[in-house]
Amino acid sequence: QQQVKQSPQSLIVQKGGIPIINCAYENTAFDYFPWYQQFPGKGPALLIAIRPDVSEKKEGRFTISFNKSAKQFSLHIMDSQPGDSATYFCAASWGGGGATNKLIFGTGTLLAVQP
Amino acid sequence: GAGVSQSPSNKVTEKGKDVELRCDPISGHTALYWYRQSLGQGLEFLIYFQGNSAPDKSGLPSDRFSAERTGGSVSTLTIQRTQQEDSAVYLCASSPPGQGIYGYTFGSGTRLTVV
């Protein structure tokens, strides 16, 4: 119940394409769903996050779609660029940050955007 | 400091040796977290510090793993009698007061290789 399942494991798209990364969870107590971006040799950095009271959130070229009934959420990258090539992790947590202070991470998706 | 600093950046050790990994959080960040990132896996929570106390150490995989934090600042993760399965990237994150999971800043990690 604590797991977050992420797919695909890797993804190759052409510049300008729209890669989509999917995550699924079981624990209905989860109420915070962030996406992290990690470049080689660096730590993950927060990209965008959503709460279950909205179905979509956009920040620049990055969009999270959230389906509460299906317990799924996904990251879309519009007009992808070679600089977006990185590993992307979804995560989830619960308790409003007070009851818990840990994130449950997916296994990551290695994205390559070809010029 | 400007960011979360981890040292060493790389560590190669022989099986059975003890290792110490260091994390310097961002100044003023009261919360500190350790995660482990194994090849092909997501980030696995190890331990959470609030000040010098560790209210959640549920992720430490065995009694060979221990961590401490002193002065509300620097933290050290110690692995005794290292095994090959301990090979991973060990990531530290810190967070400002009251932000918990919403305010994570990760360091670049220590890549540990046990040979």
Image (cartoon, coloured by chain):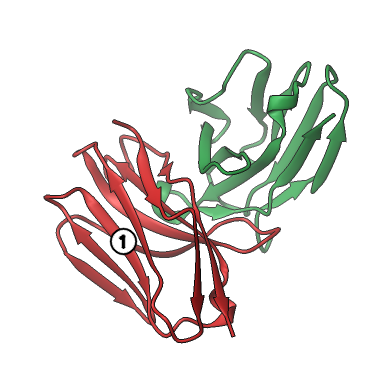
Chain colours: A red, B green
Residue located 22% across and 60% down the image: A66
Q: A16 above or below A6? A: below
Q: Is residue A86 left or right of residue B22?
A: left
Residue located 19% across and 55% down the image: A52
Asked if residue B99 shows in the view, the reply is no
Percent x, y of residue B20: 78, 30
Percent x, y of residue A79: 42, 85
Quadrant, the N terminus of chain A: top left
Residue located 63% across and 13% down the image: B63
Quadrant, the C terminus of chain A: bottom right
Q: Secondary structure at mark 1?
A: strand
Disc 1 crowd, CA 10 A, few/some/many (<14, 14-19, 20+): many
Residue located 62% across and 64% down the image: A39
Q: Quadrant of residue A99?
A: top left
Q: Residue furthest top?
A: B63
Q: B25 above or below B50? A: below
Q: Residue furthest left?
A: A69
Percent x, y of residue A97: 33, 44
Q: A113 above or below B43? A: below
Is B108 or A63 nearer to us in this picture? Answer: A63
Percent x, y of residue B29: 55, 50
Q: Is residue B19 left or right of residue A84?
A: right
**Residue on which the image places disc 1:** A74
Which amino acid lies under the numbered mark 1 shown in the image of this protein? Ser
Q: Is residue A40 left or right of residue A45?
A: right
